[in-house]
Amino acid sequence: MNSTDSIGMRFRAARERLGLSHAQAAAQMRVTPAAVSAMEMDDDEIGSCCTLADVGRFAGVLRTTSRELFDIPAAVSPLRLAELEQLIREHCQSHGISVQQFGEIVDWPVGTNIADLPLVLIADICKELHVDWRRVFLSCDDAA
């Protein structure tokens, strides 16, 4: 695999490296074979449908890491969810807004655990906070 490969291509290469069919990988990942196929063919599928725990579980089945799946450079350090939550509180305080208002800005249904949000929404939260989303995605390996 090289760094120009898409997430789906890296996902597929990891599955094939293990000699797993779509059905075998799906069974271990607790998804349908069609979902595995969709993730391999459409990077948006992973971002819009998967949570940090999902990606951590998938990486575990594929014997890889979120760093490898998302091609995140070694220089990027992880940001745990508790740290992200603290950054949200600090952002709200410094901007004079409530967490509810912040949620409305980024389309986050406040009350929903961040770990249960689709990756694309976590990336939107990070963008609003001026935080590299890749840092949070590295916590996928801990969320599985």
Image (spheres, rainbow, N blue to C red):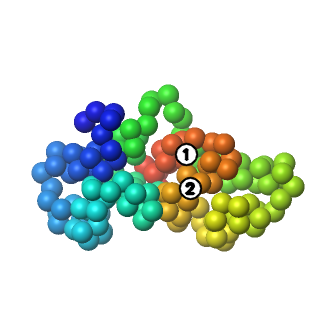
Is there any visible trace of residue 82 in the rendered image? no
* Disc 1 element: helix
Residue in the image at 66% along x and 60% along y: 106
Look at the picture and state if 57 lies above or below 110.
above
Q: As rendered, which of 62 and 95 lies closer to the eye?
A: 95
Quadrant, the C terminus: bottom left
- Please give left or right for residue 4 compared with residue 99 in the image: left
Quadrant, the N terminus: top left
Report x, y in % for residue 8: 30, 51
Report x, y in % for residue 117: 53, 64
Label 2 close to label 1 by CB (< 8 Å): yes
Is there any visible trace of residue 102 in the rendered image? yes
**CA gap, disc 2 and disc 1:** 7 Å
Number of residues whose C-alpha sits closer than 10 Å to that of mark 2, classed few (under 14), some (14–19) or many (20 or more): many
- Please give left or right for residue 25 compared with residue 53 in the image: left
Report x, y in % for residue 38: 28, 62
Q: Quadrant of residue 55?
A: bottom left
Residue in the image at 51% along x and 33% along y: 76
- Please give left or right for residue 94 compared with residue 132 in the image: right
- Please give left or right for residue 82 compared with residue 141 in the image: right
Number of residues whose C-alpha sits closer than 10 Å to that of mark 1, classed few (under 14), some (14–19) or many (20 or more): some
Residue in the image at 29% along x and 67% along y: 35
Question: In the image, which disc is placed on residue 122?
Answer: 2
Q: Quadrant of residue 43?
A: bottom left
Q: Amino acid at mark 1?
A: Trp
Residue in the image at 48% along x and 44% along y: 138
Look at the picture and state if 78 lies above or below 142.
above
- Of pointers 2 and 1, the one earlier in the residue sequence: 2
Q: Amino acid at mark 2?
A: Ile
Residue with the mark numbered 1: 133
Q: As rendered, which of 127 and 60 lies closer to the eye?
A: 127
